[in-house]
């Protein structure tokens, strides 16, 4: 299943689309100094297909491109960062360290 990730800046979220169906989203609050990821949702019909990971990767890659530190209050995004150490340096919390 091909999924397209889009930044819907008007709604403040990255969206995962499977064709014409919204499969999930990762909300954000972003300014010129920080991005906060408070909530991620994947529709039940799309769970277990890597949609959450695709959303996390797109969101974090966007933060990196913008040069913004990340405050991951969403448990999913925070856990995903811990499993992907190449993104840990983006963390804002605990002196720029993601911790358990």
Image (cartoon, grey):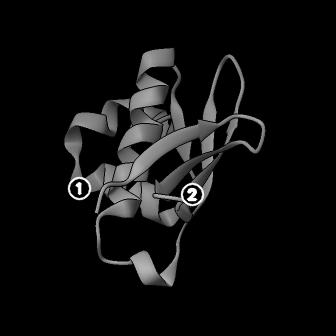
Q: Nearer the viewer, residue 23 or 57?
A: 23
Q: Spatial distance from mark 1 to mark 2, Cα to Cα?
A: 20 Å
* Secondary element at image label 1: helix
Q: Residue furthest right?
A: 10
Q: Residue at x 46, y 33 (%)?
A: 95
Where does residue 53 sit, x and y in percent of width and height?
Answer: 33, 56
Q: Residues within 10 Å of mark 2 (few under 14, many from 20)?
A: many
Does 57 appear above or below 46? Answer: above
Give the mark nearer the N terminus: 1 vs 2: 2
Query: Which disc, if any, is residue 25?
Result: 2
Does 21 appear above or below 26? Answer: below
Q: Quadrant of the N terminus?
A: bottom left
- Residue on which disc 1 sits: 83
Q: Quadrant of the C terminus?
A: bottom left
Write down the quadrant of residue 18 in the picture: bottom left
Q: Are marks 1 and 2 in contact (CB under 8 Å)?
A: no
Q: Residue furthest bottom?
A: 44
Q: Residue furthest front?
A: 20
Q: Nearer the viewer, residue 57 or 31?
A: 57
Residue 54 at least partly seen: yes
Q: Residue at x 29, y 71 (%)?
A: 49
Q: Nearer the viewer, residue 8 or 1?
A: 1
Question: Is 98 on the left-hand or right-hand side of 22?
Answer: left
Q: Residues within 10 Å of mark 1 (few under 14, many from 20)?
A: few
Where does residue 14 sit, x and y in percent of width and height?
Answer: 56, 45
Query: Which disc, if any, is residue 16?
Result: none
Q: Residue at x 53, y 22 (%)?
A: 68
Write down the quadrant of residue 48 in the picture: bottom left
Residue 67 at least partly seen: no
* Secondary element at image label 2: strand
From the image, state whether disc 1 or disc 2 is nearer to you: 2
């Amino acid at each position: 299943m091909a999924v397209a990730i889009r930044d819907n800046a008007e709604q403040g979220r990255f969206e995962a689309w499977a064709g014409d169906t919204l499969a999930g989203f990762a909300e954000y609050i972003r300014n010129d100094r920080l991005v906060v990821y408070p909530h991620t949702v994947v529709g039940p019909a799309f769970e277990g297909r890597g949609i959450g990971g695709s959303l996390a990767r797109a969101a974090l890659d966007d933060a990196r491109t913008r040069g913004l530190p990340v405050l991951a209050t969403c448990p999913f995004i925070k856990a995903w960062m811990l499993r992907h150490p190449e993104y840990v340096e983006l963390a804002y919390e605990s002196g720029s360290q993601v911790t358990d």
